């Protein structure tokens, strides 16, 4: 099975690495909007300009689109689904239904299969919300994110005047997680679930008090949270905050029987690299998309529509013998 | 959708309770090999003798078979799959391939859909082994069971001369779990992963030293484990060991990128009632079996073959809007 990468940032690079761990998958090219000569893959993979994409259509079973959710993917995925089977990691939860409709129309009209919103949230966390909800219909679920770097929140801080660089960690409140795990079904406000830790490199002479105030008062991003701001040097940023760790937990608790039995289902991730983990999910999903398309199952899909066996290189009989 | 229960022990009772939490599912009958007058459901559900089953075929979309894996299910599921769509919880891992073949032949020959080995292990744990393995192909996974009651091990103790009652708890070794969670990829022997705690009510005058020795030396069940045996009174057994709690964790750790990034995926369950939780899984699987059969997708399936959306009463659009 041949895949290609569309867009070579952190996620695209993660997909390149992930392909190396999947012997049934071949990476036939990396496509970029930049000058291909300026893009340096970690391995021996050809880099093409995106304008060459249609010329090489027969080299691509599935195109893994590694663009951003804010502006790239809402345009790219429906456009590319006309000519390719595609996978993306669109993660703006509120806009998923609209994105789905646009991609579904393009894919169906052209006999392609598309999978949107792959990754871990949306993605593996969504799957676990669904599985847990059907097993324990009378229950409540909780999603905690972190401790990890939120790239959206880090970017928001960087847009403040006087900020040279910033890194924002989302941190679950331990007492909230403990109460949920204990099956106490707490009702939690936004502030009670997560705190936000900001590390900021300021320009020389910048008004630190103003920067801190602007961060803490920023609506949607920080004003509903207990936020701490720590000013650090560029050297400390490079040394201690270069990675993109993330993770979190989906926990559902519910009652069964006559109401006297409580159950706790927890799915948790501890990730050293958010983009590399996401890339691993996307490559498995690309395998399923290829199989669905070969079976004539076209249109837009999400993780909810993929039978788990289609994610694995093993045969159904091998899966039953080894993993069931 | 109409389901019926075949066999009314702890699991069958759990299914009866689970149906109450699923408004789209109706329980049309409980079928028993005993005298129906001797079976007392918790709700207002008709109880029939199994000999009445074929007469009431049109009342049953899916039959949930609640028998034991040792002798019941290998006979029952292939036989019943000739006349019904069925779900079972066959859990003898080594014999799953043979069971699958027998059920598949019966179901396919008669246009029925069957799902075998539903529950949590096999079942939800299997799904998590599969999902984690495709995301992190270069990794290792670990399944820990407990702390919880193993009914098979409890039964094995009860067969020893001089034993009136017994309850065996399987307990993961905390140091092993911690090492796995820390991403250390330890190689663990059977003894290093779990300990076994046995609570035994002995007959008056029985030779306690002999009973303890026979337990600890029992091959397969206990000889490979650090086992503790505690003799207790029948009253203490009834008071402190009446429940059937269980649970455990599936953990996979793996590396990505250039090998410097480690990831930990963990799925864990803490269950107050093993049979009631298993029943919740079976009812969700029965919903999927009904849908597959209506679509003409016949034969034997496992959890690996079920697209998650088919487990839920919500529509695909609702799932995308609410859970993705």
Image (cartoon, coloured by chain):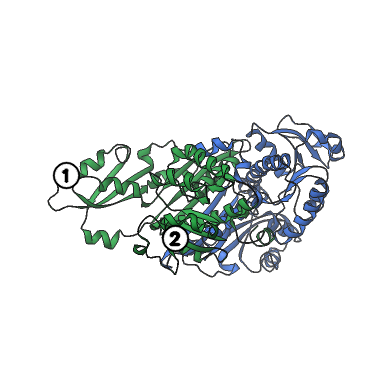
Chain colours: A green, B blue
Please, which chain is the residue tagged with disc 2 on?
A
Q: Residue at x 56, y 55 (%)?
A: B131
User: Is label 1 or label 2 in front?
Assistant: 2
Distance between mark 1 and mark 2 Cα atoms:
45 Å
Q: Is residue B305 left or right of residue A160?
A: right
Q: Is residue B205 left or right of residue A52?
A: right
Q: Residue A46 falls in which quadrant of the image?
A: bottom left
Q: Which one is nearer the viewer's eye here, A233 or A195?
A: A233
Count residues near mark 1 (Cα–Cα under 10 Å), then give few for <14, some for 14-19, many for 20+.
Answer: few
Residue A121 locus on image (x, y percent): 46, 47
Same chain, labels 1 and 2: yes
Residue B29 locus on image (x, y percent): 77, 34
Please, which chain is the residue tagged with disc 1 on?
A
Residue that extends furthest to the front in the rendered view of this protein: A55
Determine which of the numbered discs, if any, sits on residue B229 in the image.
Answer: none
Q: Tag 2 or tag 1, which sits nearer the N-term?
A: 2
Q: Quadrant of the N terminus of chain B?
A: top right
Report the residue marked by disc 2. A30
């Amino acid at each position: 099975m041949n895949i290609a990468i569309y867009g070579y940032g952190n996620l695209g690079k993660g997909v390149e690495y992930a392909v190396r761990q999947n012997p049934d998958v071949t990476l036939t090219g990396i496509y970029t909007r930049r000058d291909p000569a300026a893009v340096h893959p970690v391995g021996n993979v050809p880099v093409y300009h995106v304008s060459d994409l249609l010329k090489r259509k027969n080299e691509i079973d599935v195109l893994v689109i590694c663009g951003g959710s804010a502006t790239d993917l809402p345009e790219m995925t429906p456009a590319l689904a006309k000519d390719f089977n595609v996978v993306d990691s669109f993660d703006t939860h509120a806009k998923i239904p609209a994105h789905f409709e646009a991609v579904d129309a393009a894919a169906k009209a052209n006999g392609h299969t598309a999978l949107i919103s792959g990754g871990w949230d949306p993605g593996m966390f969504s799957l676990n919300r669904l599985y847990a909800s059907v097993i324990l219909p009378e229950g409540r679920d909780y999603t905690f994110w972190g401790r990890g770097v939120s790239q959206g929140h880090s970017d928001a801080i960087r847009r403040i005047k006087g900020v040279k660089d910033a890194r924002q960690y989302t941190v679950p409140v331990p007492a909230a997680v403990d109460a949920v795990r204990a099956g106490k079904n707490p009702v939690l406000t936004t502030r009670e679930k997560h705190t936000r830790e900001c590390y900021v490199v300021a320009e020389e002479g910048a008004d630190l008090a103003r920067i801190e105030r602007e961060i803490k008062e920023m609506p949607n991003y920080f004003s509903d949270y207990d936020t701490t701001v720590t000013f650090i040097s560029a050297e400390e940023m490079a040394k201690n905050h270069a990675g993109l760790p993330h993770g979190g937990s989906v926990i559902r608790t519910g009652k069964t029987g006559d109401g006297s039995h409580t159950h706790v289902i927890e799915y948790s991730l501890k990730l050293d690299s958010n983009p590399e983990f996401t890339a691993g999910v996307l490559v498995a999903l690309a395998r399923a998309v290829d199989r669905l398309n070969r079976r004539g199952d076209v249109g837009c899909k999400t993780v909810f529509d993929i039978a788990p066996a289609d994610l694995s290189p093993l045969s159904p009989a091998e899966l039953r013998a080894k993993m069931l």
